[in-house]
Image (cartoon, rainbow, N blue to C red):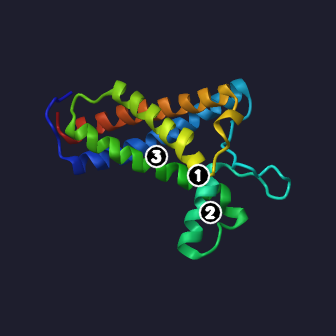
Amino acid sequence: MSRKQQNPIVGAFCGLAGGVAASAVMDVYWKIVKMTLGDRPEQKPKGKNDGQEEEQPSTQIVADKVSEALTGKEVPKKDKAKAGIGVHYATGLLFGALFGIAAALRPRLGVLGGLLYGAGIWALLDEVTLRVLDIGPDVDKVPPIEHAQALGAHLVYGSSTAIFTRLLLKILGGR
């Protein structure tokens, strides 16, 4: 693997591809968790257990908020699952591009950096941002096993992003 800096724009594109591949690997992680431990824990909205409104995964809530900002309407019910998947992959693409830029500029950034990056994303998004935006439940209402499973998913994402991005940078860099 080369230790020379590469073009950050190339890094961003490699990271985009790495991020989408890592998002798919993250989906496989959740399928394995479901097969071994039961249903996937979803980040449910805070205070929506009154029986009046159906709970939705956080990705679907974010999709609704984006749709409302762009069109003035929520995502149609029949399209919510697809929109949630779209948010998941768009987030993976964005964070992949950011990792790709960093990887292009910091040639020694490898799998360990990816693991730390994944843990940071988990802490920033799952543990803080969803709660600040009042999308996720209070931290103390989520069982520790669900925190651990979500951290595991993000470690898988981060390390996979690092591996795929580094591989693409190596291929495109001709090294």
Q: CA distance from mark 1 to mark 3?
A: 11 Å
Q: Which mark is residue 85?
A: 1
| Residue that lies at the very extreme toward the bottom in this rendered image | 72
Mark 3 packing: few (<14 Cα in 10 Å), some, or many (20+)? many
Which residue has dot 2 on it? Answer: 64
Is 63 drawn above or below residue 32 in the view shown?
below
Viewport quadrant of the N terminus: top left
Which of the two discs, 3 and 2, sits closer to the camera? 2
Residue type pointed to by label 2: Asp
Image location of residue 107, percent across then percent down: 21, 32
- Mark 1 or mark 3, earlier in chain: 1
Q: Position of residue 52 (x, y in %)?
A: 84, 58
In three-dimensional space, the C-alpha distance between marks 2 and 1, rounded to whole angstroms, equals 12 Å
Identify the mark at residue 92; answer none if there is no mark: 3
Residue located 17% across and 38% down the image: 174
Q: Earlier in the sequence, mark 3 or mark 2?
A: 2
Q: Secondary structure at mark 3?
A: helix
Callout 1: few (<14), some (14-19), or many (20+) C-alpha neighbours within 10 Å?
A: some
Helix, strand or loop at label 1? It is helix
Look at the numbered disc 2 and give the secondary structure of its residue. Answer: helix
